[in-house]
Amino acid sequence: DVKVTQSSRYLVKRTGEKVFLECVQDMDHENMFWYRQDPGLGLRLIYFSYDVKMKEKGDIPEGYSVSREKKERFSLILESASTNQTSMYLCASLAELSNQPQHFGDGTRLSIL
Amino acid sequence: AQTVTQSQPEMSVQEAETVTLSCTYDTSESDYYLFWYKQPPSRQMILVIRQEAYKQQNATENRFSVNFQKAAKSFSLKISDSQLGDAAMYFCAYRSRNYGQNFVFGPGTRLSVLP
């Protein structure tokens, strides 16, 4: 089974801090994703990566950046955290084949005070 | 751009009964994939069922089945013999076969199962 591991389940940070969310997958998947989940809005894509050092903006990239230095690891960075970034963050990975589903991590509940 | 709509924010069903969750989507493409994901209270999202648009036969996975109406752009999920463990958020998702790796998710339906 594919395992996607997010480094923290709960995280509390202060406004203005630089925040790192880490995600690791163990199935050698090419594609990795960061989503933000808010009630009534479903999952919104922040960034995705289709290869090492490659990234594409999603629907809501403002205030975020990402890093993919190794195939198995995809990091989400909040450059200067703000209270409107309080949310659930989900990481996912995906094999290259187009009919495959994404595999998700447990999520990180991030609170910005 | 594609959009996915789930018009039922919340649903409830009695244990052992059948419930149908609705999903509609908007696309100009003819070839794509549709998915239903389940997110239990423990939060990890897992795949329930998938459908390939070029297949006319509705997908089935044990107690879960879909009613895929391509012309109507509708993709509903039927859960038969509902169990307490079926209580979760359910998300409908669309993925183009031809363009990129992105999925488009609906807003979700929270399903409660009543004993």
Image (tube, coloured by chain):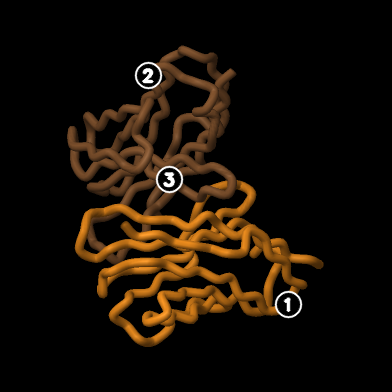
Chain colours: A brown, B orange
Depicted B40 relative to depicted A48: above or below: below
Choose between A10 and A55: the one closer to the eye: A55
Image: A14 above or below A67: above
| Picture quadrant of residue B115 | bottom right
How many numbered dots are placed on residues in this image? 3
| Corner quadrant of residue A4 | top left
Residue A79 — which label? 2
> Horizontal and vertical percent for residue A84?
52, 27
Crowdedness near tag 3: few (<14), some (14–19) or many (≥20) residues, C-alpha within 10 Å: many
Q: In the rendered image, which quarter contains the N terminus of chain B?
A: bottom left
Residue topped by disc 1: B16
Q: Mark 2 lies on which chain?
A: A
* Residue type at numbered disc 2: Glu
| Separation of marks 2 and 1 at Cα, in angstroms | 49 Å
Please state the chain letter of the residue tagged with numbered disc 1 in the rendered image.
B
In the rendering, at what x and y percent does residue A77 appear?
37, 25
Q: Is mark 1 on a helix, strand or loop?
A: loop
Q: Which chain carries label 3?
A: A
